[in-house]
Image (cartoon, rainbow, N blue to C red):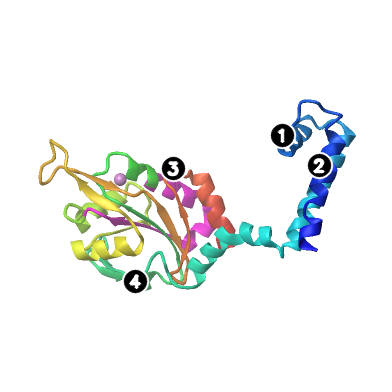
């Protein structure tokens, strides 16, 4: 049955429409034009035939297309429910000099950004978007804890982070740690960072190259989703609203 039904809709539809429209050679082109123009009942008949054909193919092939469409979501679900491929336990120091671990934040959604306070523009922009997203969330924001984890522990002391955090969000947790602690948490979150050895870089004056991703972790400490660099506050807020409600 599989092999017999497959070619049917395609061969049926092609000869039907070919004589009517001279220029069209392939079905895809034709379908696009049919959708664009919105005219011609025949176009819609052919389109309907194509849809029926695809539906049959999907059904016959054991929902193969359906499975494929679900793949990306599946892997996200796996991340959320199974082994934490992104994230994991950490022990760090907050801007008050107090040691904190990931367990201290259970029950809260976490928005985590890895950056550093000397960053000229990427980090401030990302942290601003994060804060704006929380403002847009209204009351729901109370369930989300914004967090900055420095990838420049040599310069980002708790005191330094404390002042920096006040520029963004009153509840921003700004965390630092030993180079080893930072390396461990960055590895767990698959964050890349590296000191830029520019010509005018000195021991205290240098730039860091680093990935710019905002992670959202669930109240269970598991990865939920991430926002790539440049995601605006509105998009963040709307996706957060989706998963929190
Ligand atoms: Ni940065």
Q: Residue furthest front?
A: 4
> Is 96 located above or below residue 167 in the figure?
below
Residue 21 seen in render:
yes
**Which label was assigned to residue 230?**
3
The residue segment tinted magenta is 127-152
> Is 182 located above or below residue 20 in the figure?
below
Q: Residue furthest right?
A: 41
Find ligand 1 in the image and state its quadrant: top left
Q: Which residue is mark 4?
A: 89
Magenta-colored stretch includes residue 70: no
Q: Residue at x 63, y 57 (%)?
A: 69
Quarter of the image where one finds residue 90: bottom left
* First in sequence: mark 4 vs mark 2: 2
> Pointer 2 and pointer 3: residues touching (CB < 8 Å)?
no
Kind of element beneath mark 2: helix
> Pointer 2 and pointer 1: residues touching (CB < 8 Å)?
no
What x and y, as percent, mark residue 241? 57, 56
Compare residues 223 and 198 and report the one nearer the observer. 198
């Amino acid at each position: 049955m599989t092999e017999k039904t497959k070619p049917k809709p395609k061969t049926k539809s092609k000869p039907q429409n070919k004589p009517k429209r001279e220029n069209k050679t392939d079905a895809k082109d034709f379908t696009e034009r049919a959708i664009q123009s919105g005219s011609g009942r025949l176009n819609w008949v052919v389109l309907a035939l194509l849809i029926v054909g695809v539906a049959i193919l999907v059904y016959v092939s054991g929902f193969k297309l359906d499975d494929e469409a679900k793949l990306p979501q599946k892997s996200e679900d796996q991340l959320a429910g199974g082994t934490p491929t992104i994230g994991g336990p950490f022990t760090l120091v907050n801007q008050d000099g107090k040691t904190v671990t990931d367990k201290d934040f259970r029950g809260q959604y976490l928005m985590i950004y890895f950056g550093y306070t000397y960053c000229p523009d990427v980090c401030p922009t990302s942290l601003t978007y994060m804060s704006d997203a929380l403002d847009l969330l209204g009351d729901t924001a109370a369930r989300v804890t914004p967090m900055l984890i420095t990838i420049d522990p040599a310069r980002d002391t708790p005191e330094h982070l404390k002042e920096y955090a006040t520029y963004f969000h009153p509840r921003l947790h700004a965390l630092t740690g030993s180079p080893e602690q930072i390396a461990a948490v960055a590895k767990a979150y698959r964050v890349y960072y590296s000191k830029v050895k520019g010509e005018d870089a000195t021991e205290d004056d240098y730039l860091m190259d680093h990935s710019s991703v905002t992670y959202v972790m669930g109240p269970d400490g598991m990865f939920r989703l991430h926002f790539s660099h440049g995601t605006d506050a509105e998009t963040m807020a709307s996706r957060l609203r989706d998963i929190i409600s």
